[in-house]
Image (cartoon, helix red, strand yellow):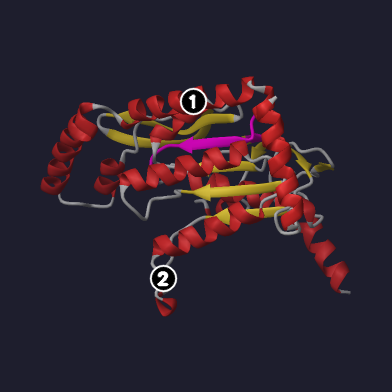
Amino acid sequence: MAKLDVLLNFAVIAEKNFYVKPEISESKVLDIKGGRHPVIEKNLPIGQDYITNDTFLDNDTQQIIIITGPNMAGKSALLRQTGLIVLMAQIGSFVPAKTAHIGLVDKIFTRVGASDNLSSGESTFMVEMNETASIMNNLSDRSLILLDEIGRGTSTYDGISIAWAIAEFLHNHPTARAKTLFATHYHELNELSTSMPRVKNFNVTVKEVNNKVIFLRKLVPGGSEHSFGIHVAKLAGMPPKLLGRANEILKRLEQERTGGEQIKDSMRKIQKQAYQLQMFAIDDPILEKIRDMLNNLDVNTLTPVEALMKLDEIQRLLKN
C-alpha cells in the first residue's frame, strides 16, 4: 500500500506539473535542459512563469562550474534545483525539466546556507568548514557537489584563498572528478578557468536600467564582474545617505586594495608560478614515476621494512 501510494503521488505530481521522464544511465554525464525548482515554481505569483535553466556537467570537459552573479539573482536556487532533480530522478520520480539525462550519482554533497552551532561553541564559519571538510574527505568519481558562497564567513583574502584551494583540490584530485556547482561572490575565481581546463565560468544575468537592477535569472556562459550588493541594500530600504557613503567606500577600496593591484592580477601571478612548477614535474619521467609510486602506497598497511625498500627503490631511480 505504501509503495502504491508513493507511485500514485509521483504520477499525479508529474502530470499536474508537466514533469518529464529522466533518462538514467551509468555514464558520468549530468545534462538537464530547462530545469526548474519544484518548490519555488509552485510559490510564484499567478501568471508568472518560472525561468528555466540548463545545466551540463561531466568528468572530462566541464567538471566544475563557477557561478557568479548578484545577490537574489538565483544562484542558490539553481544549485538546489539541480540537486533536487538528480534526487527525484534516482528515487523513481519524473522531474521538473524539458529533458534530463542523469548519469548515476552515488552522493549529493551540499554546503548551502549559513548557520551556527552555539551549543557546541561553533561559529558559522566553523560549521561551514566542518561541512566542507567532510565533503573533501568523502567525495567519489560519481559525486555531485553543490557549494554556495564558500569562505564568506571570514576575511576577503582568507575566503578567496580557501575557495580557490577547494576548486583546485576538486579539479586536481587523483582519483575522483566530482561534478561541482560552485556559486560565489568572489569574481576573482573566474581566473581559475585559464589554468584548469575542466573549470568553466557562468553567471546569472541581470540588467541595469536607470541605476536599477532587473534580475533576469538566466544562467549564461562567462564570469560576472559585479555583485550589485549596494543595489540589493537599496531594495531592502537602506537610508540613501548610508548607500551613498557605501558607494564612496567601495570605489576607494577598489582603487587601493593590494597596493593598486587587483586581486585577480595577483592570482594570475600565483597561477603562473604554480604552472611552471607543474610543467617541471610533468616533463620529467623519473619524477612522474616516483609520484605514481607514492600515490599507490598504502601507508596504513606498509611495514617499516617495505618502507625502506621503497625508499631504496626511489633513491636508485634518482641516481640512474
* Nearer-the-camera pick, 92 or 138: 138
Which residue corresponds to the image point at 81% horizontal and 44% vertical from the top-left? 21
Residue carrying label 2: 122
The relative height of residue 7 versus residue 209 in the rendered view (above or below) is below
Q: Which residues are magenta?
A: 55-71
Q: Is residue 225 visible?
A: yes
- In this rendering, position of residue 162 left or right of residue 252: right
Q: Position of residue 45 (x, y in %)?
A: 49, 51
* Quadrant in the picture for the N terminus: bottom right
* Quadrant in the picture for the C terminus: top right
* Helix, strand or loop under label 2: loop
Q: Position of residue 295 (x, y in %)?
A: 70, 42
- Is residue 61 within the magenta segment? yes
Which residue corresponds to the image point at 61% horizontal and 48% vertical from the top-left? 145
Which residue corresponds to the image point at 29% horizontal and 28% vertical from the top-left? 262
- Work out how far the residue at label 1 is from the one at label 2, CA to CA, in angstroms: 36 Å
**Label 2 neighbourhood size at 10 Å, few (<14), some (14-19), many (20+)?**
some
Q: Position of residue 205 (x, y in %)?
A: 45, 32
Identify the amino acid type marked 1: Gly
> Residue 222's mark?
1
- Is residue 275 within the magenta segment? no
